[in-house]
Image (tube, rainbow, N blue to C red):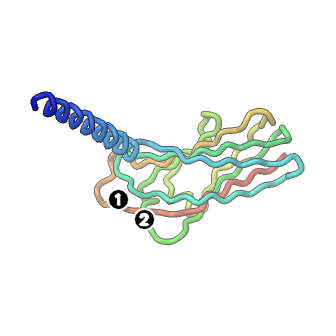
Amino acid sequence: MKRTLSRLLTISIALLTLVGVALGIVLIKSHGDFKKNADIIVSEDETIKVKDLDVSLTGFYPGKSQEYGISLVCEAEGSYKITLSFKKVGDGTLENYIDTEVSADGESKGANLLKNYFEGEEVSFNANVDSKEPLVINVKYSMPLEVGDEAQNAVTNFDLTVKIEKE
């Protein structure tokens, strides 16, 4: 009887530990940065390519950030002009509180309030792209710690347009 009770208690503790670990992983992933990825391939015969990416930002709170990674592969190596533009889709007010930073291969290419990008500002830069190595473009969206409760639970949806032109 004692042996059976001891085994049941051990199994119960093991199951509760597994549930706790699983919940911990879910909470860490939901509160930490996460990265969405997109691949854009420019074929050798294309001199211009335009790709629209749907972005939805929800669940932000002060200190939270999300990152969108774009892997750009150009089959013809050389110099390219890359332009990112942002077009709001639908309602929402989150753009008033979100800082947006664009970098390529770790070098900052532009930073601004998302609202300013919705109003027509673009990020444009030139890059030499090697056909063997993708150019990695990161777009990071973050809510500053100073933002108050008025921004929590706000949302915004938009198209991120990436235009690639061979120079």
Residue 156 vs residue 8, the one in the foreground: 8
Is residue 78 found left or right of 30 in the rendered image?
A: right
**Residue on which disc 2 sits:** 93
Residue depicted at x 60% and y 33%: 106
The percent position of residue 50, horizontal first and vertical second, equals 74, 57
Q: CA distance from mark 1 to mark 2?
A: 8 Å
Q: From the viewer's perspective, is residue 146 above or below residue 15?
A: below
Q: Secondary structure at mark 2?
A: loop
Q: Secondary structure at mark 1?
A: helix
Q: Identify which amino acid the numbered label 1 is placed on.
A: Ala
Q: Identify which amino acid the numbered label 2 is placed on.
A: Thr
Tag 1 near tag 2, CB within 8 Å: yes
Mark 2 residue crowding within 10 angstroms, few (<14) / some (14–19) / many (20+) = some
Q: Quadrant of the N terminus?
A: top left
Q: Give the residue at the far left of this rendering.
A: 2
Is residue 79 found left or right of 122 in the rendered image?
A: right
The percent position of residue 102, horizontal first and vertical second, equals 58, 44
